[in-house]
Amino acid sequence: MAEKLRFCVLGAGHGGTAMAAHLALMGFEVNLYNRSRERIEPIIERGGIELLAHDVEAAEGGEARLGLVTDDCGAAMADADVLMVVVPAMAHRFMAEQMAPHLRDGQTVVLNPGRTGGALEVRHVLNEMGCTADILLAEAQTLIYAARATGPAQTQIFSLKNNVPVAALPGHRTAEVVRVLRTAFPQFVAGDNVLKTSLNNVAVMFHPTVLVMNAGRVEDTLGDFEYYLQGITPSIAHVLERVDEERIRVAEALGLHATGVKTWLYVSYDAAGRTLYDAVHAHAGYKGIKAPATLQHRYILEDVPTSLVPMISLGEELGVDMTTMRSIANIACLLVGQDLWAEGRTVETLGLKGLTVRQIRRLVMDGEPGEP
């Protein structure tokens, strides 16, 4: 590719502002879209975002000048080669609906991250809306950054992961996605398929489970404690290990190998330890990240319906005992007073209900399930 790719970041939250600023400081043209103009008004007035780098080896800080910053999705997408969707997974359906009329042949769309089943859901929505553009659709296993927006037009990157698997739907196009993304991010590596990236979704581990088990502490302190380093005690780490075992068994039922979360911490952050508790506390990038101030937070409101529920639904469809995950999801619903099961992704909404393991694997690799 002789010319530098042009990026559009869709979503101006913690991850979106970090990605837009980082890309701009690397010399790429970047447009930024957000559905609420109020959130991006300070960025429009400033003409960009101030990036604070917690670790200069991860990203250089500075004043990042952006191209078009707008609440007009079509305008933001118009001249972009790569569309980086950086929104809570509950907004993937909305974003697919916004993108559908404006997508054009040759564009690459990447969910950062897809959580569990994100690419499957987006493809289903695009088909429902009659979108025929020949796009390259993919999902990342996790967000490449640990970052927080620290002001109206200011963001901070705490750390950058060493490698992030990404997979296309259909899977045989993954190499194309990696080639595109590595022009900016050498950290992206090829994942086997979107089942693998979905089942290696570490949000299942560190978001709903930790927040649910720290519910009293969150309400008592309004989140005034370090979420990872104080919120993950030895006993809570033990529960996380049980959740991890169920996730790995779902992958095995599909004939896949899922990376254990302790191994993931080492590969992503060089954080090593004899136990999961030790590995979490060996990760310097978690230092300073505070807990949410409320239980009405995306770690529950997003990650239960888009991470836990689809994993439980798929696991139970395959005959896997999902007792620990189901318990966490049920308690989460009670804590926030919502039926998160009703709005969650399931084998029905992802188009996997009734498919054999062979059909599911063919669907994600070839785009069609074929005969049983």
Image (cartoon, rainbow, N blue to C red):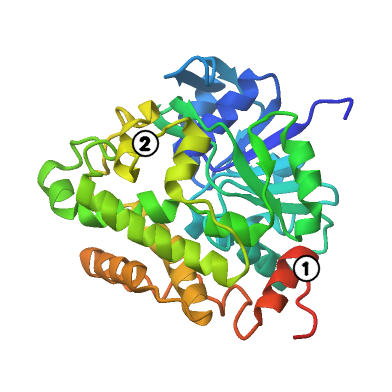
Classify mark 2: helix, strand or loop: loop
> Residue at point 45% right, 34% down?
146
Q: Position of residue 251 (x, y in %)?
A: 55, 65
Query: Which image quadrant: the N terminus?
Result: top right
Query: Which image quadrant: the C terminus?
Result: bottom right
Classify mark 1: helix, strand or loop: loop
Amino acid type shown at disc 1: Gly
> Residue at point 82% right, 64% down?
132
Q: Position of residue 275 (x, y in %)?
A: 33, 43
160 lies above or below 204: above
Residue 197 sits in which quadrant? bottom right
Q: Nearer the viewer, mark 1 or mark 2?
A: 2
Q: Which mark is residue 367?
A: 1
Q: Position of residue 131 (x, y in %)?
A: 77, 64
Mark 2 neighbour density, 10 Å: few (under 14) some (14–19) many (20 or more): some
> Residue at point 53% right, 33% down?
161
Q: Is residue 24 left or right of residue 78?
A: left
Q: Which mark is residue 269?
A: none
135 lies above or below 157: below
* Closest to the observer, 355 or 107: 355
For the question of whether residue 178 can be seen, the reply is: yes
Amino acid type shown at disc 2: Gly
Question: Where is mark 2, residue-wise?
Answer: 273
Q: Is residue 49 left or right of residue 158?
A: right
* Closest to the observer, 234 or 337: 234
204 lies above or below 320: above
Residue 339 sits in which quadrant? bottom left
